[in-house]
Amino acid sequence: MSTVETLLADFAHRPVTGEDARRMMRLSVFDWAACGIAGADEPVAAILRDRALSDGGRDEAAVIGGGRLPARAAAVVNGTISHALDYDDTHFAHIGHASVGVLPAALAMAEVTGADMATMVDAALVGVESAVRVGVWLGRGHYELGFHQTATAGAFGATLAAARLLRLDPARTVAAVGLAATRASGLKSQFGTMGKPYNAGLAAETGVESARLAAKGFTSSPTGLSGGLGFGPTHAGIADLSGFDGIGQRWLFETVSHKFHACCHGLHAMIEAVLASGATAKTTDRVQIRTNPRWMTVCNQPAPVTGLEAKFSYRLTCAMALSGVDTSAIGVFTDATAARPDLIALRDRVYVIADAEVGEMASRVTIHRTDGQSVTATFDLDAPISLEARETRLRRKGAGLLGAAKSDRLFAAAMGGDLSALIRELA
């Protein structure tokens, strides 16, 4: 009888069909790499990279910012670094960052196995799709209880990407999934701290470690994910089998969301609505933000005092947008910005209301003006965006992060066939 584990093992090694999904994956490779390179000097990146390089070990895989490490160490470092700015893609089917937990594992194992760019991209696509599907299978209760899907569901995606690159047989792929089940971890309580990007690194590390151990014959429970006392039942999973409907024929990853503001993705619809309203700080008396209740525990820090905390604050980012602060610029999310008296004064006139009638990817903002009038604006991140328009916005974002020349080289590498060209840009 088929189990979730055998279904995933079968999917991991199927031929990949779907050119739009592949194109989306390559755009995410570019976006992931740009975020990683831009975040290479963040404090969390320096701490983890320096520690790993001081540990040393076999030269197997490149590290963002320079140096080479064993594949497992490179995966955890690169996963953490690429999520350090919290500017990477998100999938709202399970509310998780799709690429940061999977791509570092796929890249490290591609180097180990000598895979080319196309092979790495297909493995990463299988991995991110699996992560989203597992996340849907676990259900929102898993996330709402406090587990970080980027780290938990992402660990299974990273494992399946690594298993594909290692060409594990079905039994060993199932064993790798079982090992991931006993290693997967990550809590939402880390949001606003260095622990959040570390969660992504842990997912990538789990993928490499689980697949490589299984390749050596390391055994585990064949139902470690879905069986009694398995990961799902013990982590508030609801076992929603519809999460696997059409797997391999229909790609949920095609609806991934890329970030165009340098903060938690849950804030983006609100920011777009504020910008669309045409309101400014000078004309604003108070603001009412209506958002889906699911975001209240994620990005509703009412009085942030650090730049990192500011990335998870409806009230402050609303004040920033009204005040003309460019929320797409990484450099504006600083402790100094969080402490600006004018922003604090406006922040304290912003009220956030949980409203179940507002879609998960939408926000409705009502701005009460100083002249007694009001304006309401709504934005929904679920609105379709073509691959061409998405590419244009991502390339603009990349140029803003890295400069035009570096961004253009990185884009060419992500779209090309030579994996070493991508690695050169990362390192």
Image (cartoon, grey):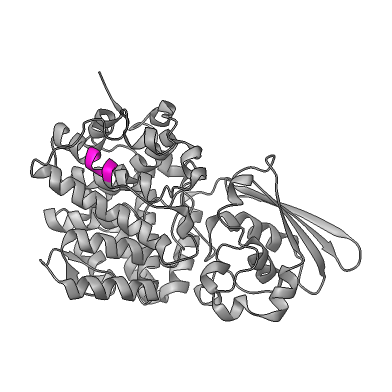
Q: Is residue 178 magenta?
A: yes
Residue visible at 39% across and 71% down? Answer: 39
Q: Give the prevailing secondary structure in the magenta stretch.
A: helix
Of residues 393 and 191, which is closer to you in this image?
A: 191
Q: Magenta segment range? A: 177-182
Residue visible at 22% across and 55% down? Answer: 117
The image position of residue 374, as x and y in percent, is: 85, 58
Residue 33 in sight here: no
Of residues 155 and 221, which is closer to you in this image?
A: 221
The image position of residue 188, as x and y in percent, is: 47, 53
- The answer to whether residue 358 is above or below residue 336 is above
Left or right of 316 in this view: 351: right
The image position of residue 199, as x and y in percent, is: 37, 57
Residue visible at 38% across and 70% down? Answer: 407
- The answer to whether residue 326 is above or below residue 13 is below
User: Residue 323 lies in what quarter of the image?
Assistant: bottom right
Q: Is residue 302 magenta?
A: no
Position of the N terminus by quadrant: top left
Residue visible at 26% across and 76% down? Answer: 50
How many numbered markers are drawn?
A: 0
- The answer to whether residue 260 is above or below residue 324 is above
Left or right of 306 in this view: 206: left
User: Residue 129 lies in what quarter of the image?
Assistant: top left
